[in-house]
């Protein structure tokens, strides 16, 4: 006598998980990069969207990214979305193991935004670029704001919705006898 979980049940749980990750990733990543392009471009008149994206690419390919045109801007955009995906998947994976995240999705989102900013700004970027983080109030405020008001909350709200929907609507797993 063999007990198996039907493939239909596995797929019915996997598809909403993937769609929730996909949605959280696109919303958070798009809000973040849109904020950066608007803030550093038209609002403060510092750089163009292409220069911002090339700056992201420059963390991997160096100063040559700024002369690479659209290709390096697209590389920067791809890097941004890959990093956003990694942070989204991390939140999705740790959510079931940290009950604190389910208590208040807004607070969790803000705290996750601070966490992401701290690791990226204080650890990852300095390690990749070889330059230590130097605190400056205005750039700090402009860089942490989207993390705590847009990026973290977007991920937290969407992933929270997935887990609460699944726990309420999760199909009863039926074990079939004699199937392998």
Image (spheres, rainbow, N blue to C red):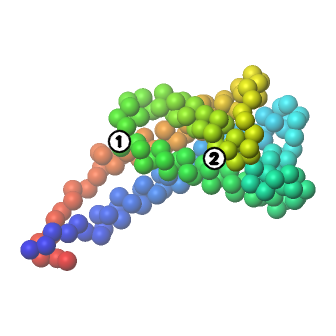
Q: Nearer the viewer, mark 1 or mark 2?
A: 1
Q: Provide the residue designation for mark 2.
A: 29
Q: Provide the residue designation for mark 1.
A: 97
Look at 47% across and 32% down and name the residue there.
108
Look at 36% across and 65% down and name the residue there.
11
- Is there any visible trace of residue 10 in the rendered image? yes
Asked if residue 98 is positioned above or below residue 170 in the image, the reply reads: above
Depth order, front residue of 37/93: 93
Q: In whole angstroms, how far apart are the C-alphas of marks 1 and 2? A: 24 Å
Which labelled disc corresponds to residue 26?
Answer: none
27 on left or right of 33: left
Q: Position of residue 57 (x, y in %)?
A: 77, 53
How many numbered marks appear?
A: 2
- Position of the N terminus, as image quadrant, is bottom left
17 on left or right of 37: left
Q: Residue 177 occupies which quadrant of the picture?
A: bottom left
- Is there any visible trace of residue 31 in the rendered image? no
- Position of the C terminus, as image quadrant, is bottom left
Task: Tell me the element at label 1.
Answer: helix
Residue, far top: 137
Residue, far left: 1
Look at 78% across and 34% down and name the residue there.
39
Q: Residues within 10 Å of mark 1 (few under 14, many from 20)?
A: few
Dot 1 or dot 2, earlier in sequence? 2
Q: Position of residue 113 (x, y in %)?
A: 57, 34
């Amino acid at each position: 006598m063999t007990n198996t979980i039907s493939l239909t049940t596995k797929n019915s749980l996997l598809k909403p998980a993937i769609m929730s990750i996909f949605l959280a990733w696109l919303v958070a990543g798009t809000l973040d990069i849109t904020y950066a392009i608007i803030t550093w471009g038209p609002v403060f008149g510092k750089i163009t969207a292409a220069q911002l994206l090339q700056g992201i690419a420059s963390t991997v390919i160096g100063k040559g990214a700024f002369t690479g045109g659209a290709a390096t801007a697209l590389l920067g955009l791809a890097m941004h979305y890959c990093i956003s995906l990694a942070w989204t998947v991390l939140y999705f994976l740790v959510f079931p193991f940290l009950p604190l995240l389910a208590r208040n999705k807004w607070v969790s989102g803000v705290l996750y935004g601070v966490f992401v900013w701290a690791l990226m700004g204080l650890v990852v970027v300095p390690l990749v670029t070889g330059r230590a983080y130097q605190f400056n109030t205005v750039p700090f405020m402009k860089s942490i704001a989207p993390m705590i008001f847009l990026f973290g909350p977007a991920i937290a709200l969407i992933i929270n919705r997935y887990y609460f929907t699944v726990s309420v609507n999760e199909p009863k797993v039926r074990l079939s006898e004699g199937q392998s």
